[in-house]
Image (cartoon, rainbow, N blue to C red):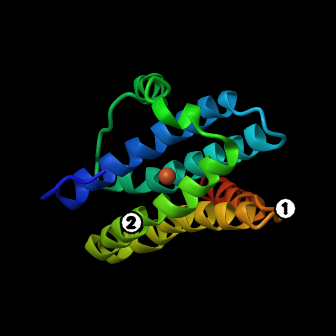
Amino acid sequence: MSRRNLSYEETLIWYFEEEIEGEAYFHALAEHFDEPGAAEKLHVIAEVERCAANVMRPLLERHNLVTRDENTLRADAVTKIGKDANRTWPEYVDHVADYFPVYVPMFEALENMAPAEDRAALERLTDHEHVTIDFAIREKAGDPDSAKPMRDYITLCDSEALRSA
Ligand SMILES: [Fe+2]
């Protein structure tokens, strides 16, 4: 995921669409793992993506941005599973721990482009990557409650969404 010279608004649209796709992707990817607890944890990752998308919705509205149709994005996302389906669960967790940190500076760059009124939401967006990486590190270490940072994030985001609804 690297595109050059996108405006702030274009980047918001792109990242929002990625989160919508991510939610569908991780739910679908869950079908490919047999290891105990793996599917459940991927469904939690998917919920983190759903929350991350929701964090961005007020920003899309504020800037009058139109994204691609969400159902189309979801349908496309599940066709892109590819090699992730062939990994074992420990291999996939290693992949998350090793590769997902590349996204953090991209989200931080978006924070830095943002007008002040958008920053809190975008910090929350960046957090979704941190909790997912934190999960993978905990899972690698054998933490029996490795998904806790992600569950806490979902609880927080959903409670904020209710308050602002
Ligand atoms: Fe994401």
Q: Which quarter of the picture shows residue 40?
A: top right
User: Residue placed at 33% from the left, 32% from the top?
Assistant: 68
Look at the numbered disc 2 and give the secondary structure of its residue: helix
The dot on residue 107 is: 2
Q: Residue at x 47, y 72 (%)?
A: 123
- The answer, for residue 149, to whether it is visible in the render is yes
Task: Identify residue for label 1.
Answer: 145
Does residue 156 appear anywhere in the picture?
no
Q: As drawn, is 116 to the left or to the right of 77? A: left
Under mark 2, the amino acid is Phe
The quarter of the picture where residue 134 lies is bottom right
Q: Distance of mark 1 from mark 2, alpha carbons?
A: 26 Å
Q: Say which residue appears at 81% left-offset and 63% top-offset.
A: 142
Whether disc 1's CB lies below 8 Å from ligand 1 is answered: no
Are there few (<14), some (14-19), or many (20+) residues within 10 Å of tag 1? few
How many numbered tags mark residues here?
Answer: 2
